[in-house]
Image (tube, helix red, strand yellow):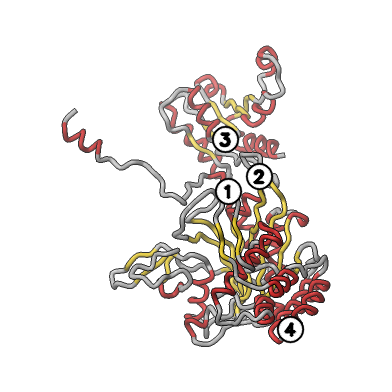
Amino acid sequence: MSDNKKNNQNNAPIARQVRGFVDNRADFLTRRNALVGKILETYKLWGFEELETGAMEFADCLGKFLPDADRPNEGVFALQDDDEQWLSLRYDLTAPLARFVAQNYDAIPKPFRRAACGPVWRNEKPGPGRYREFWQCDADIVGSALPQSDAEVIAMLATALENAGIARNSYVVKISNRKLLDALLVSIGVPVEDISTRLTILRAIDKLDRLGLDGVGALLGAGRKDQSGDFTKGAGLNASQIDKVLAYIQTRQETRAQTLANLANLIGNNEIGAEGIAELSAIDETLGALGILPQMAEFDPAIVRGLEYYTGTVFEAEYLETTIDEAGNEVRFGSIGSGGRYDDLVMRFRGERVPATGCSIGVSRLLAALECAGKMPEKMDGPVLVLVLDKDQIANYFQMVQELRNAGIKSEVYLGSAGMKAQMKYADRKNSPLVILEGSNEREAGIVTIKDLKLGAKLASEITSNEEWRQGRPAQFEASRADLVNIVRQTLEQGAK
């Protein structure tokens, strides 16, 4: 080998994948597309207009993750355009919506009901189940300040989950309102301008499911040491303040009305708290009218979402089923959808508040939840495969597949150079339901041989001896070449039953 060839070989790129990105093959894409289709179908049934925005936005239009640095790449993937403006891949579907609404404000109907599904990108450290590219399905109502619009989005989220295959008793949408938290913090003497303490309190409340009341109480006070010995500094509240926060996060009851009554007793005399309770009361009434039962959507004051992003109602859809990981531990999927009211997002562009509310379903997490529940379809059938037994007759084989394709039947001709055994292995890897064989003897007789691979696999699992296999020759038969399309269609239909 010459030195040049050695150098070329040594300089060849190594085939490797960027961490946090996934190659998806046909089976996954079929499942994902079917799921997205069901969600979008629900959104459109509820009067939402499908909108597709570009993958890239000007970085200053995103606003959420961008740091005060020369290169705005914290949380987003960014590059500089030829006019030195920074562009970023969208990190969600809501920021592009805000830009679109501001840009087309006078031309769109208001309220504007938007539905969207597509990939988003996060420049974050990837890990198990945490990707840098993933799909979301969003629905938003822009231009309505009515709490009934929040209720409709929540009800539609629940409906979309059920239409996607999540059983009614396998999820719950937990609802709260940021105004309740604001009222609570005012009532315990934490001023609005003390952002650091407010954040620490909200983060402690958000850990209720994981740490329990004692753990949250420690984080509200001096702090907490975890099992590894790491110490987390607390909010520094006194015992009276801690008791009131813990009482607040325990106000949830079996019915939404009972929870509202508890909240009214605790913070109802506060103006902003009363406003939040009134909004939740209107949401409760609308949810009832839409047939959303308490076990489908409940009020849970412990729900905490983005401090600066959400301005009113907030909610999370939680998948309740458990699964077992590789170590034998029970794992809860947690949130498979979320949303809330964000009245300040469009204001960044227009200088005036534009009310908006919306929901987002995480497609990857929902797919994983459906797989856990055993709701995913069987492996997708591949194409009917026409084997090439006589290479000088390949044009005839192509005529067969074209007849099948004209009838809407997925099919292909084997285009490798291997013999019959390898071609059958290829059919297996492609998950072909049928293979068609035509050698010289069949051609002279005007027939083809059809092997039903799906039926063959089923019968093979039931046959106990080679003699029984030879005698039965299961799932293989001869058919008229002239009637190929009808026979293949009938066989596929029988296999689908």
Near mark 3 (Cα within 10 A), the count class, few <14, some 14-19 or many ≥20, is some
Q: Which residue is mark 3?
A: 431
Q: Residue at x 54, y 58 (%)?
A: 135
Give SS at disc 2: loop
Q: Which residue is mark 2?
A: 377
Vertical placement of residue 89 versus 470, above or below? below
The mark lying in front, picked from 2 and 3, is 2
Near mark 4 (Cα within 10 A), the count class, few <14, some 14-19 or many ≥20, is some
**Label tally:** 4
Residue 163 found in image quarter: bottom right
Q: CA distance from mark 4 to mark 1?
A: 48 Å
Vertical placement of residue 428 versus 262, above or below? above
Mark 2–mark 1 contact, CB under 8 Å?
yes
Q: Is residue 125 visible?
A: yes
Q: Earlier in the sequence, mark 2 or mark 1?
A: 1
Near mark 2 (Cα within 10 A), the count class, few <14, some 14-19 or many ≥20, is few
Q: Which mark is residue 274?
A: 4
Q: Residue at x 49, y 76 (%)?
A: 100
What amino acid does circle 4 point to? Ala
Q: Residue at x 69, y 55 (%)?
A: 319
Q: CA distance from mark 3 to mark 1?
A: 14 Å
What amino acid does circle 2 point to? Pro
Q: Is residue 139 visible?
A: no
Q: Which mark is residue 30?
A: 1
What amino acid does circle 1 point to? Thr
Q: CA distance from mark 2 to mark 1?
A: 10 Å
Q: Earlier in the sequence, mark 3 or mark 1?
A: 1
Q: CA distance from mark 2 to mark 4?
A: 48 Å
